[in-house]
Amino acid sequence: MKELPKRITVIFEPTAACNLRCLHCYHADTDYLPDIMPIEVLDKFLSVLKPHYNSVNIIWHGGEPLLAGYDYFVKAYDRFADFARETGVKFDFYIQTNGTLLDETYANLFETTDTNISISYDGPYNDVLRQETDKVEETIDMLQHRGIDLRCLSTVSASTVHHLVKIYEFFKSKQLPVKFNPIFPDGAALSHKELAISKEDWTDNFIDFFDYWLDDKACNIRVASCMDIIHRFFGVRNGCLNNRCLFRYLAFDARGNFYPCGRLIKEDYRLANVNEIDDLREVFLSPTYLSILDANKARVAKCHACKWYDKCHSGCNATASLFGNMANRNDFECYFNKRFFDHLADICAQGKPISNPYAKQLFCKILNRDKI
Amino acid sequence: MTDSELEILKKLFCDYESENNGQDSCDSFIFDNVSYCYDDYSDCHAPSI
Ligand code: SF4
């Protein structure tokens, strides 16, 4: 029987509070509760990890995680370091932040703890959904000036979906790696229907942008959205994509509750509280998790006949749930994947030349070739 | 967690994996000076869709 994973990724939410109120925020339903995770809750989290996991990714998330405060983070990193020393567990740290509170002191901390920084920033259209653009740009300049490798997560809405090339060129000019995410219908976005993107609009514009990117000899940044889809096309399942999250990802909130995913921090998806368990793996036997597994199975069964199943694997569980029901295929994602995989299959069949150095390197790596 | 619960969990995981043909090793590679691992969020912290 296959062994249970020894590696887990936890979307770690030290607070749900946020100092911005972005128009599309999927967290709006949580009411931005101001609680900060007590350090005893973090200690209890560590106690349920052992000895079942040997490698743990911690993704600081929120709300705005830095609202937990600098002293909190220093204490938390000390706890993780002590635990790692005692048990040999390896931790890798990531943070998704709006960048408004990230100063030199935090930068020092993240540098010494090897924390990968990602900033939520929409480039030339940052004011459409977000605020405090000057402050965020100051933070980005400061981090780049210090030589810290960072990346940006850029949300695309109906007002910006036609400008993907312009946004990409902006990120190139700043040498900032970027990932594009279309707005999805949850939280505050539900009250701003004008920002929603149709599946056709997202797919048409993303394909046009992808072709531009593939041809771009001058590309000087990683564009994770393009790399992700190439991975998917060649059947390489990375991260939590393609129905690969179950048993490998969890979210953990300030009150010590576990959820299956950072996008599903909702009462309906609460799996257990850390004080109710002795072993983290117990959350996978909770009634809520079992019903997620059932819904997942039902969705997968509906996809078996699809010619792209081995690449898509029935898509993302959270997306399926947020757009309707986890037991059903998500129409937005399904439409996008089918069109995109058809498009990539055409590109490969025609032997279309690839100029982008990043794409070339990635194709070579995946196809195990010296050149393409 | 009792032994029987552990067995149930393993069975659930195996069912899921056989359906989904997952991979649980961390096959990593260096790309543009960044270490990627197929089993983490690698470049950014959210799914693409
Ligand atoms: S493309 Fe659609 S039908 Fe095909 S596997 Fe994905 S979700 Fe299922």
Image (tube, grey):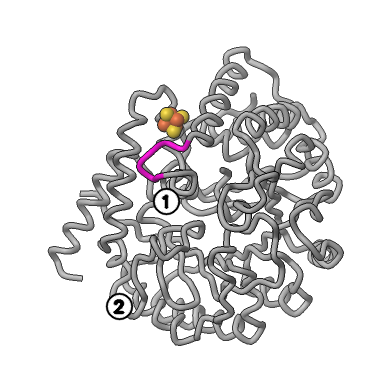
Q: Please provide the residue range marked out in magenta.
A: A325-330
**Which residue occupies 71% across, 58% down?**
A150
Of callouts 2 and 1, the N-terminal one: 1
Q: Which mark is residue A276?
A: 2
Q: Give the amino acid type for the residue marked by disc 1 in the picture.
A: Cys
Q: Is residue A203 visible?
A: yes
**Which residue occupies 80% across, 42% down?**
A167
Q: Position of residue A288 (x, y in %)?
A: 31, 59
**Which residue occupies 69% across, 49% down?**
A155
Q: Give the amino acid type for the residue marked by disc 2 in the picture.
A: Glu
Instruction: Tell me the element at label 2.
Output: helix
Quadrant hosting ligand 1: top left
Packing grade of label 1 (10 A; few <14, some 14-19, many >=20) is many
Q: Position of residue A4 (x, y in %)?
A: 29, 56
Q: Position of residue A22 (x, y in %)?
A: 70, 60
Instruction: Tell me the element at label 1.
Output: loop
**As displayed, is residue A206 above or below residue A93?**
above
Where residue A148 sits, quadrant-wise, is: bottom right
Q: Nearer the viewer, residue B27 or A311?
A: A311
Q: Is residue A101 left or right of residue A230?
A: right
Q: Ligand 1 closer than 8 Å to the CB at disc 2?
A: no
Q: Mark 1 — residue?
A: A245
**Which residue occupies 57% across, 33% down?**
A230
